[in-house]
Amino acid sequence: MGVQGFQEYIEKHCPNAVVPVELQKLARGSMVGGGRQRPPQSPLRLLVDAENCLHRLYGGFYTDWVSGGQWNHMLGYLAALSKACFNGNIELLVCFNGALEKGRLHEWVKRQVNERQTAQQIISHVQNKGTPPPKVWFLPPVCMAHCIRLALLRFHIGVVQSVEDHHLEVIALCRENGFHGLLAYDSDYALCNIPYYFSAHALKLSRNGKSLTTSQYLMHEVAKQLDLNPNRFVIFASLLGNHILPDEDLAAFHWSLLGPEHPLASLKVRAHQLVLPPCDVVIKAVADYVRNMQDISDLEAIAKDIFKHSQSCTDDKVIRFKKAVEYYSAASKPPQFPPQLVRPKQIGVPAAAPQYASPKMLNIPQAPLPVKPGVQHSYPDPLAERSLALDSVGKGFPEQNSFSNIPHEGKHTPLYERSSPINPGQGSSPNHTESAFFNTSSTSSSSENEESTGTTANHVNDHKGEWEKNGNNSHSENTPEGEPGDQTKADFCASSAVSPGSQAGGHHSLNAHIPSLLSMPTRNHMDITIPPLPAVAPEVLRVAEHRHKKGLMYPYIYHVLTKGEIKISVTIEDEANKDLPSAVQLFRPIRQYVYGVLFSLAEAKKKAERLAMRKNCLPEYSPVMVKEWAAYKGKSPHTPELVEALPFREWTCPNLKKLWLGKAVEDKNRRMRAFLACMRSDTPAMLNPANVPTPLMVLCCVLRLTTWTPEVSSLPLCS
């Protein structure tokens, strides 16, 4: 599980680091230690990561999520939440994940495999027992995030969407805009020194709507529990396993830390399948290893030591280890300027180059600073923007404050005990002689980036399905992380892997070779290169980016225009039913027409026909292909499907610039007709309010589509 399991480790093994808090008291300036209260000078401003908080924003694990969710119930809960925040002087900004994140595709594929199994368990439970499934099987209904986003906008709660790297942009948004805390549930944030970090899973609104409670994570207590100085969290996170260097590639290193005498040593290789040690065991072992390092700035020596048991692709793993350290170091970079306190309506998602907010600037309450006008920046590759030198990692640590020098208003103080000093115990290890600075930004799970390689692996205490081996990844034009040469190295490693050894694990010394299965890379997803996308007007891209950042547009639109691919999550549907098509297949014709509208295929086709007429030859059309990553019955999420964009047959749709930016009445009518044409409902009767009331138009379009689809229209329900 790598870094992903660190959040659960905190809750299970660090009870002193999880403290219940009431957000209204924090907003009133209540201090438990001093017992005094101050009148509010400004609201308590919290940033919410919606990706970790969907079930709480929905209102909890109510049984109606199984049948698609209940809009009115969700609206009622969000209305009560909005009222409680307004009355309690709390200001929320909710950040939704709008990033495609190809660098974390391995992580997404793994999650889809697990969720697909969960969906079938839910279907089987409902069919066999006729009762609601357990809440631990909770799967968000289709478009829940989209519905919650619309509801939040309705209640005037600030909303933004990430663009390239969700975690880095959330961190940057929190630090650069002076938020008082982050409400989330992800190991990334636990390790990146967020000033005040609250649990999204523990967020609860009382029945009377007057009390909003959650838990606060005290990372200085976690550091004391691990006996690990926070300035070493960069190396710590890199060695746990992450999306750049997955824990599968670190398996040999993790087993070597346990030693041959460990009770679990005999489980290294079981049934020719890689088995990873339990997450809590790995965390403790890696913490001990990092604590005893003499020089954390010598990455070459560290990499040489941790990969000494690796039997293949050592150079590639060393490169990715350095990239992981660079990634986390840049994410925890100290601020170059004080944060600006701006309101949600003025906030655009910042560029993914997180800065660190000064602890003294985050005292609550505090007067707002003037907002400097500026333009929103584009979102280049997160790693390309950062020019942090690898050899400087660790050299800047002594310039930071030490544990003993943290001020009483410091960043590790519980939010409700800001006036209480911190007196951590002094350690005698070399770890405690260095500075205390949370110099990390980790990732949410043990996964690999687009250029890395992985292995078939199970944790001893986990129940993960066996991965399918799909060969090497063809390099795509969209590569968010790494260098072009990394894919070549990864492909070479995959083709030259050594066959599994026959030695029994646990019966040889630490210097003996770990079985080669621990080092055998396997591709966990296979990408496909698509033809170049048609050019999109700059005005259209600016509008799309603006609306995407503000949370005013479904993220698929921006992904198609800029990347030419989308990821479709698993839905709860019965795969054993051979009569019904999957939702992905059922609505694919709509998406094909939408792709055609987005890339103005009708106009391009018309131009090609005119050119062919002048040349007296057949017209030549360049197909526009969009990659769809999805998992449904008969389809694995490990490879994408190429879906062709289609123009309308009945009429020539205007180009996207005119369709979006046109202000005439005719343009409005064309927009409505384009929508109806995508839904295959472009008839005069649909536009007549006497036949179809406007509020029921979408419902009628969906019903008309399902009855039109041959696979569905043959069923008694739709006939």
Image (cartoon, rainbow, N blue to C red):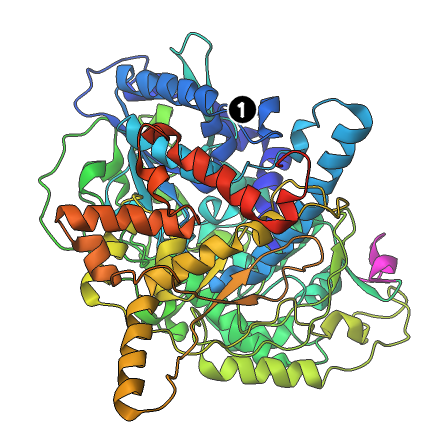
Residue drawn at x 24%, y 38% is: 360
> Is 650 rendered above or below residue 177?
below
- Label 1 packing within 10 angstroms: few (<14), some (14-19), many (20+): some
The quarter of the displayed image where residue 145 is located: top left
Q: Which residue is mark 1?
A: 60
Which percent across, then down, holds residue 471? Answer: 68, 76
Give yes or no for residue 263 being in the magenta stretch.
Answer: yes
Residue drawn at x 52%, y 61% is: 628
Residue type marked 1: Gly
Say which quadrant the C terminus sits in.
top right
Check the image and name the residue furthest to the top. Answer: 208
The quarter of the displayed image where residue 369 is located: top left
Residue 442 in sight:
no
Which percent across, then down, holds residue 666? Answer: 17, 49
> Is 246 rendered above or below residue 155?
below
Front residue of 385 and 108: 108
Label 1 residue SS: loop
Front residue of 93 and 11: 93
Which percent across, then down, holds residue 39? Answer: 19, 15
The magenta segment: 259-270
Residue 536 in sight:
yes
> Is 549 rendered above or below residue 200?
below
User: Total number of numbered labels?
Assistant: 1
Which percent across, then down, holds residue 42? Answer: 19, 25
Give yes or no for residue 310 being in the magenta stretch.
Answer: no
